[in-house]
Image: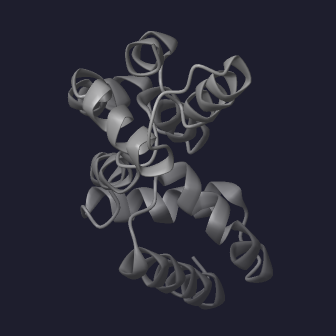
Amino acid sequence: MIPQANEADKKLRNRALYYLAKREYSFHELVNKTLNYAEELGLNKKDCEFIISKLREQNLQSDQRFCESYINSKKNKFGAQKIVFELTQKGVSEDLIATFIGELVRNEYDLALQVWNKKYSHVTQDINEKAKQIRFMQSRGFSFETIKKIIK
């Protein structure tokens, strides 16, 4: 490998570590975040994936930690459906999501009730207001079955 390429690898690795020092990233997300910088250094996506896979081997990047951290940060605002969708968009495997989402699904009613109580003070009999509350809860990613239990 030529010295210039080796220097570019080090710069890209340092940039990825800089991002990881701020927060956890999924593998896919980190590749996309560092790709523009990699191209400026004359590297391509495969080089970027290789360097980040080395960080993964050293346990500096972990989809497992990212998934756990992401769910913990979002669970008080959003339901399981929305969190699963967002994690999928960020390139986290379905198996890994299933590992961590189970507890959230089991506690969905309590979490949904907290979110609803924060926004609304009472269940209304007005059909338009009730529909508005249901739409709000659906936009937060809660299942319709859970929403029906809260908004009777």
Q: Residue at x 73, y 83 (%)?
A: 41
Quadrant of the rendered image containing residue 113: top left
Where is 20 relative to 143, above or below? below
Q: Residue furthest front?
A: 125
Q: Residue at x 69, y 57 (%)?
A: 45
Q: Nearer the viewer, residue 23 or 28?
A: 23
From the top left corner, tell me how far across and down residue 121 is, in percent.
Answer: 44, 43
How many callouts does the rendering have?
0
Q: How is the image coloured?
A: one colour
Q: Residue at x 38, y 33 (%)?
A: 112
From the top left corner, tell me how far across and down residue 128 is, in percent.
Answer: 73, 23
Q: Nearer the viewer, residue 1 or 91?
A: 91
Q: Quadrant of the N terminus?
A: bottom right
Q: Nearer the viewer, residue 77 or 42?
A: 77
Q: Nearer the viewer, residue 41 or 149?
A: 149
103 left or right, relative to 66: left
From the top left corner, tell me how far across and down residue 52 is, in percent.
Answer: 47, 62
12 left or right, relative to 69: right
Q: Residue at x 36, y 57 (%)?
A: 73
Where is 122 relative to 13, above or below? above
Q: Quadrant of the C terminus?
A: top left
49 left or right, relative to 21: right
Where is 77 relative to 109, above or below? below
From the top left corner, tell me how far across and down residue 28 is, in percent.
Answer: 56, 50
